[in-house]
Amino acid sequence: MLRSEHSLLRLCLIRAGKAHKHTPYPPSIPKYNLESHVPHIVSFSNLVHLPNPTVMTTPTTLTKMAGGWRFVLHGGCAETCPDAARQQHILRNLQEVSEIVSDRLAKRVKARDVVALAVSALEDRPVFNVTQDGVHQLEAVIVDGASSDYGAVGCTEQTKNPILVAHSLSYHFTTPFPKAHWDQTTESGQREADLEMGTVGAVVLDSHGHIAAGGSMGGPAGKMNGRIGGTAILGAGLYADTQLGVVCSGSGDQIFKHSVAAQVAKYHTSGTSLREAARQALIGVAAAGTSCALAAVDAEGNIVIEYDVKNGSVLCQHYEVERCALVTEGNNCLSLIPLHGLTKDWKPIISDLKEFHETFPGYVSSKDGPMIAADTLDDVCLKVQKASGLTTPFNYRFDGDPCNTNLFSRIIRGELGQYRVWENEDHVAFLTPFANTPGFTVLVPRRHLPSDIFSIDKASFRKLMTAAHRVAAHLKDAFGVSRCGMIFEGFEIDYAHVKLIPIHTADVTYAPYSASGPSPAAPITTVAPFQETYQGYVSSLSGPLCKDTESLAVSTLKMRSKHHVKTHILPPRSWGCPSSHRTTVLQHPWYQKLFFTQDAIFHASVAFFQKRLGYKYCFVPVTTNAVNSPMGLGSDSDPVPILFLGQKTHLADSMQFSLEYFLRIADGVPGVYYINTSFRGEDPDAMHLNQFYHVECELLGPFSEGIRVAETYVTNLVSTLLQDHKELVETVAGTTDHLVAFLEHHRSHDCKLSQITVDDALGLPIMDATCWKYILAPDPSRGRTITRAGELKLIEHFGGPVWLTEMDHLGGPFYQAFTDETRQKARCADLLLGNGEVLGLGERHVSAEHVRAALRQYEIPPGGYAWYGEIREQKAILTTGWGMGVERFLAWVFRHDDIRDMAIIPRMKGLSFAP
């Protein structure tokens, strides 16, 4: 549905019918507070507020008249807006359309007709985007809540106003619409070369009490031909009935996937307030890390605008300011300062006050210093360049319009003299000639981003912070200081930049004087004066003590209510007392939450394997005569021998052998899976249980396919927990930030987790003697293996999950395929996440010969594994398998470090638990 086949490209897709009042299918979603994500005016959308702009911080068109009608217009959703001029242009366009709509509603025109008029007027405004080939493939939908009539069109190329076609369809849904009407509509709006289309929409409550909604979309910049977004899908990007109307804008795929508009209706119908219904409907989109905004109007005239974009600030919302500054002295404290007195349009605000300090005066400040002599700047520049390793020629690439005249863009392009001290592919750092302390440095991105750093997209923000950390390290090295301050402010130059200030604690022998004489250094004080409005600089110096503690307490409570920090449940660790564990499980909320989460993981896993992949489930015995971890050279665990009705056998430590066998039963089966218990005999500890639960699968295909399926499985689990069980996880873990971070990490790496071989990992400087050991000490010829300490360091090094690949073959099980004919490395991988290895994966030997060679190499008696080679002689297929320890995964989800707390009914060596 989202991406049409070749036969549908360049065709007009037409749909008409009844809008059924149904209960949307997604399950209930826990409450998610989005108040802390209120975006800045230039960073969110083209929603405008009329006529009273003091009601909401979001620029939204809300019109309330005595006649009892309401309407909302929107002009699209985006994480960023290019500049204030474009934003004002968008606002003016919406204001003009607002006047037209107000006039019609005042004349008691029906909601459906007003929606068509409003959206067509928005379509005529060339402020949005075209598709990838420069061809306008448009879509539109309109729905009348009073009659449940709706009409929709998609992939239209010859229609200037697709909303008018959809409007016609909504009146003619029971019979083929008149061809003459269609011809007249399409011919009257020939495609214009300069017409640009994005997402626009309207929701109207008319004076008759009827609600209608409509939307039109040309798609995001570069939209693929034939792709249909969420706008033209009833229940996804739009919904209306007798009780409410909803329109959405943003990531069409996610809006469609999560049925956002229908979700609002579902929650609202169940009795939830309109605002809370909107917030809950956006949870799935928020978890996916994409943007979505929605506007909703109910039959009572309530109007709600909600959005999931991450930009924004609790402080900005509470104090009704446009932005905040950040100041830190490089210690353990960050100061966020609301900047009062600013207008929505950026204007330079510069202070005439100057100061200079050779040593740290007890605070950092963004005040300018006097112009420093060129020879002094040369000396400082060379000093920092030596520490950073920067050499000429510099990279003068600017990622933007070459005609951009902003000061920083000209510096990046090398058009102005500068004291550049560091650069990489995305950023440039240089000394300012107006430093208030030696080494004061400015860091800027090569791309012209908004000066409000808190409004830029998350990926750019992270890159900028990483660059700031590196430059600060070079400054500390160059000046021999232990700290470096940092300031975000942005009211001298309208361009994202970070100010980095070395904290000098000893005299510095630089002459900070210009030809005009010494600077008027500001006196060092212990308290900064209180200012009602932003004065053109910020400082880490504290202001006077607030005596109105009551109002301070009220402000604190209000902000906390908007960004509530959740407490979390701690485990009772009752496994340490088997006699009382049974009672504790029935009383402690930890085990209740664990029970529900286990259930969620089981059903999400079955749905993934069965519905998404078409894998078959296997019923396998828990006993085996061939354990997966035999007592050979490469064993990393102990088997569990038992006497079963007089027969010596083992409890299965994995079902991998059985899964390989089952996969050969029928041709055409892409994979098989299993979810149940496994057993191992080593002493239990924070990472090991004697009985644990395994999710295992065996699939047709090579190692790379196994990696792909495993990553997709884990990301699917994480997404499900975020979307359907967010509140459950938060009550135990205290947050779901780590789940969101996992998805963002996966997405930011092209939807592929990082990989590193064992040899490359051991070559990293961070991997000291605690991070590895010999497989068979003290014989180095047998290879090395990574310890848990090493796994944790690798997770830290990569900033998240990472695959550890190509182990020395004796460091893993014998059944993993060789990487080459040397037979020294195994084609296998461990997924490191949270506390260490969570999932193990490997490609299998294809031939019986390789199986027997591996058994000899591991010094394992071949008798018990003769069958394992023989099934390859009967059916030689290339397979890959993996298994995930559920308790280890749960420990990461719960942000806990001991899997013994992840078992409701434990089975541990030397301990007896009932039942």
Image (cartoon, rainbow, N blue to C red):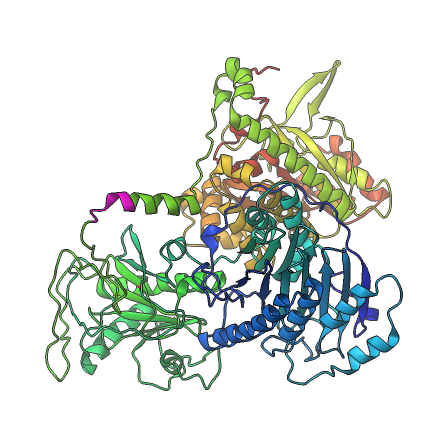
Left or right of 393 on screen, residue 375: left
Instruction: Name the image quarter holding residue 247.
Output: bottom right
Please report the residue visible at 28 percent of the width from the left and 46 percent of the height from the top: 552
**In the rendered structure, which segment of residues is drawn in magenta?**
546-551
**Residue 42 covered by magenta stretch:** no
The reply to whether residue 272 is in sight is yes
Please report the residue visible at 25 percent of the width from the left and 61 percent of the height from the top: 532
Please name whichever residue, 171 or 74, is drawn nearer the observer in this view of the structure.
171
Please name whichever residue, 519 or 630, is drawn nearer the observer in this view of the structure.
519
Left or right of 32 on screen, residue 694: right
Q: How many marks?
A: 0
- Quadrant, the N terminus: bottom right
Q: Where does the image place residue 890, in percent across and percent down from the top left?
A: 56, 36
Please name whichever residue, 675 or 75, is drawn nearer the observer in this view of the structure.
75
Q: Where does the image place residue 548, in percent across and percent down from the top left?
A: 23, 46
Please report the residue visible at 47 percent of the width from the left and 24 percent of the height from the top: 572
Left or right of 346 on screen, residue 725: right
Q: Where does the image place residue 496, in percent across and percent down from the top left?
A: 39, 70
